[in-house]
Image: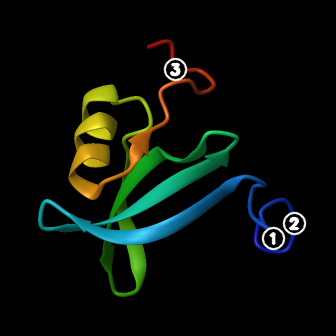
Amino acid sequence: MRSGSMQFGLPGFRAERFFLWGKPVIVVFYDGEEGEKIHDIQYQEVENDKIVYHRSFYFRKEIICAAAEELGFAPQLNKPAADW
């Protein structure tokens, strides 16, 4: 993935680290015509420099909306495979 399909990231998306409710998370933003919106929130646990647990909240509308309010961003509610 590093040398192929994900080498340059995904157009229109970017990720930033945040502390959310006392936990380090990765917030994935979609930068569209209406500005940046929270697309996904990911949580990982790392041991010995290896990811041992990964969780994505892409399909958790309540989490995305609550995090958007907490962090001061808009949530992306219209996205692929999420029929909200």
Which residue was labeled with disc 2? 4
Q: CA distance from mark 2 to mark 1?
A: 5 Å
Which residue was labeled with disc 3? 82
On-image quarter of the N terminus: bottom right
Q: Amino acid at mark 2?
A: Gly
Query: What residue is rendered at 41% in x and 42% in y?
Result: 74
Q: Position of residue 66 (x, y in %)?
A: 22, 40
User: Mark 3: few, some, or many residues within 10 Å (few <14, many ≥20)?
Assistant: few
> Looking at the picture, does residue 44 appear above or below residue 3?
above
Q: CA distance from mark 1 to mark 3?
A: 26 Å
Which residue was labeled with disc 1? 7
Q: Position of residue 20 (x, y in %)?
A: 21, 61
Q: Amino acid at mark 1?
A: Gln
> Looking at the picture, does residue 81 appear above or below residue 71?
above
Closer to us: 33 or 48: 33
Judge from the rendering whether residue 71 lies leftward or rightward of residue 28; answer left or right: left
Q: Amino acid at mark 3?
A: Ala
Secondary structure beneath label 3? loop
